[in-house]
Image (tube, rainbow, N blue to C red):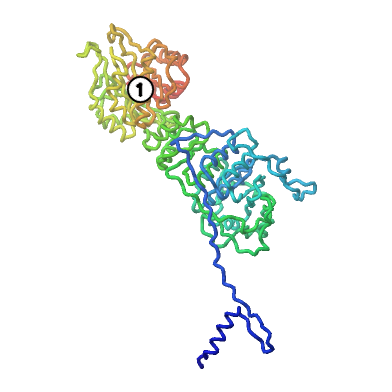
Amino acid sequence: MPRPTRTALVAVVALALAGCSVVAPDGERESLPTATPTPTPEPPTVHQGEVSVPPDATTVLDAADPVAAALRTSETLFASAPVAVVAPADDVAAQLRAASAAVALGAPLLLDAADDGAAAEAGEGTEDGSGDAASPAPTPSPDASDESAPPTDATAAELDRLEVLAVLTVGEVTVDATEDVVVVAAPQDDAALAELLGTELGAATPVAAGGEATSVAGLDRAAPALLALEGAAPPAPGAEDETTGSGTEAPGATPGATPGTSPAPSPSSEEDEAPEDEGSEESTDDAPAEAWPLTELPEAPEAATLLVTGGTQDLAPTATARAAGLAVVAVPSGDPRATSATVQAVAAAAPQTVVALGPAFGTPEELAWKVRTAATGVELPGGGQVLFPGRRMVALYGTPGTSALGMLGEQDLPGSIARAQQLAAQYQALTPDVVVPAFEIIATVAAAEATPDGNYSRELPVESFVPWVEAARDAGVYVVIDLQPGRTDFLTQAKMYEPLLRYPNVGLALDPEWRLAPDQVHLRQIGSVGIDEVNTVADWLAQLTRDNALPQKLLVLHQFRLSMVQERERLDMSHEELALMVHVDGQGSQPAKQDTWSALRRTAPEGLWWGWKNFVDEDLPMLTPEQTYGGVQPVPDFVSYQ
């Protein structure tokens, strides 16, 4: 091919300089098409919510109803969110589906409690049923923190505070939002919903009634299961039918969207854009695909946990917490120490920040030490960190190395463990509660003669009991350290055995029979103690338990006469670190023992636990396990053998 001549090249350049025009043979200038450069598409904006946990280590939220609970949780955990999910407050099935969507989006779940009248005002109730009535302007929204405000207004205020760009509705709800907020009804079709959310949802997972909040607590943010209430009808048809057509494509759905994010906007021409004055509720039925924002999960806070009691009212708050990346632990009683399950769940979460929902959790100060205790994961024999109810004890009483003081000293340490376990097994067959074998060890022994320190009490060495305490701990045996103080006071002796009381399986018993006045002598007078001394010991032991994050401790008061504990009605029952027990340890005929049992119970403070002692040689006759649990009512929580 011949090379172009210089003249030809000049002509080409001239054409270019002439604005891409040529001169026709007749002399007329004709324009040539000008190539338009292809614009580089702008990358889509990705929106991310901001999680913000409270600055305090422990926060307790008090909400009067499920709508308020959902609001309080959203306010507490989210500083902002590009998307929110709203479901009806009276439709648990819709809330479950909404929870899966909220967790997938990383969005708070709010509840709508608008009544039928409000729904009609929102455009659902024209006379011909067409639903074409214009929606009224939203009512000015009060402060969302005002629990007395109408729920719909409070929810609208929260959407405004979150600065949402879009709202996903599940079920029949009314959403009052500003005109620049897109409201989209969730598709009924599972695949279409997954496309809209931009994630692969797990298979539909049935949830039994009563287990809703627990199921939501287990949702994985990366791939949440699609929860459905067992036996519930499908969600009522809503505006999404008009939006999604056949139900296989949702507004804004983009095949291949990144899991855990909303779909990217779809390209569209100017003619397809939504009118600027289109309101959020009017856009529900035909929300443009490009209006749905592209989002990603918010960054989860470090070591933050939500505690709930686990009822249906906790469903939405649980979903919001999981969407924010918090662990959620159900604590039905409000005390995380109560069961093995809650102790281990809190220990696994290892929370640095705790938010709890509802009055069952008490004050933040009360909850803080309970959480710290549960987080150790250390449990009592029989499980959990709270002694009663659900647990009973059967104990050998005495002092190691001597058979004169009771059954405990009649054999060596391995033999004592085996004997306590065998005795507990006889009782286990008689009750659904866990029966724990126990030792009650007399650590300070009343003396008939004055001891070198003059207190008529022999304090046995602390270190002599350590092997017994540790072997008992390893064998699942509880230990009670029993004090017979003579002329000294209970607190002085209790502090001597503090190293033993720091073990999680060790409690304390006070025996007023052996608490002497300055001029009294054992076996000549029966001792007694004033209630102020008892309360002082309780204060000290409770503080020791709390400071060392120990499971609840048993504090026993031995008694067989009313006069042995003076002003017992003033016993301080406020220490949740302790389980307070009166142990009725009289001996003799069974009618006399039953009379003592009844008399001591008649004037007792509310909330005490009760112990019974079987004397092998002195009782006439000694009760069998069947007679003890069958004939002593209420059934004793603690039975000891001497």
Image coordinates of residue 221 in percent, x first then y, are 50, 50
At horizontal 36% and vertical 15% (from top left) the residue drawn is 533
Q: Quadrant of residue 398?
A: top left
Instruction: Compare residues 269 and 430 and report the one nearer the observer.
Output: 269
At horizontal 31% and vertical 9% (from top left) the residue drawn is 517
Count of numbered badges drawn on the protein: 1
Count residues near mark 1 (Cα–Cα under 10 Å), then give few for <14, some for 14-19, many for 20+: some
Above or below, 456 relative to 352: above
- 378 displayed left or right of 124: left
Above or below, 157 relative to 577: below
Residue named by callout 1: 540
Mark 1 lies on a secondary structure that is helix
**Residue 631 shows in the view:** no
At horizontal 69% and vertical 88% (from top left) the residue drawn is 26
Q: Which amino acid does label 1 sit on?
A: Trp
**Residue 629 shows in the view:** yes
Image coordinates of residue 72 in percent, x first then y, are 55, 38
Which residue is the extreme one toward the bottom? 2
- 580 displayed left or right of 21: left
Q: In which quarter of the image is the C terminus?
A: top left
